[in-house]
Structure formats: C-alpha cells, structure tokens
Amino acid sequence: MIRLLYFASVREALGVGEELLDVPPEVATVSALVDWLATESPAHHAAFADRARLRAAIDGRFVALDAELGTPTEVALFPPVTGG
C-alpha cells in the first residue's frame, strides 16, 4: 500500500489530495506509476496527461520520473515549483 499525495493542479484535477492504493508489483518506476495511475479514471488521465509538467518525491526526497520506485510508503506528485 502506497500513500499518494497530490499537490496544486494535480490535486485540483483529481479532486483529492491523497489516495492510499495497492500498486501492482510490475510498477517499478515513478513513470510507470504515473502510467498506471492515468488508467484509473478520466480525472487521473487528465491530471497526468502532460508529463513534462510533473515532478515527484519518494518518501520526501525529490526524484526524477525515471527513478526506481522501490518500496516507498509515500509518493508525491505535483507540477514544477516556481518562485516569485
């Protein structure tokens, strides 16, 4: 079971800030996780359609989308962070 956290536009598109899901064992990278999530509902598909505007963190550490998933307790997905 992985706790998925969604922030900013990803959260807005999904209508939830987090989900607790059983991820299939063949989902080995963050990118594969996003691919799998995109099949869960039309809202998930829309939220994850533009991968260039997506960032991730595994257990509080920023990672690239091609990072190995391993056995995390938490994965966060969010758009790029900008400052002002």
Image (cartoon, rainbow, N blue to C red):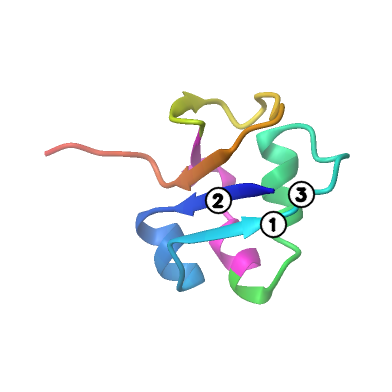
In the rendered image, residue 58, in percent from the top left (x then y), is placed at: 54, 31
Disc 1 secondary structure class:
helix
Question: Residue, x 50% and y 31% (percent of image)?
Answer: 59
Q: Along the line of sight, which residue is nearer the eye, 79 or 68?
A: 68
The percent coordinates of residue 74 (x first, y second) are 54, 40
Residue type at numbered disc 2: Leu
Q: On the image, which quarter does residue 12 sit in?
A: bottom left
Q: Distance from label 3 to label 2 (Cα)?
A: 10 Å
Give the number of the mark in front: 1 or 3.
3
Q: Label 2 neighbourhood size at 10 Å, few (<14), some (14-19), many (20+)?
A: some
**Residue 83 vertical position relative to residue 61 in the rendered view, above or below:** below
Residue designated by label 1: 37
Where, by quadrant of the figure, is residue 39 drawn?
A: bottom right
Q: Are marks 1 and 3 in contact (CB under 8 Å)?
A: no
Indicate the quadrant containing the C terminus: top left, top right, bottom left or bottom right: top left
Q: Is 44 positioned to the left or the right of 56 in the image?
A: right
Question: Which range is magenta?
Answer: 44-57
Tags 1 and 2 in contact by the CB under 8 Å rule? yes
Mark 1 or 3, nearer chain start: 3
Provide the residue designation for mark 3: 23
Kind of residue at disc 1? Leu
| Residue with the mark numbered 2 | 4
Mark 1 and mark 3: span between their CA atoms? Answer: 9 Å
Q: Residue at x 84, y 48 (%)?
A: 24
Left or right: residue 19 compared with residue 70: left
Q: Is residue 54 visible?
A: no
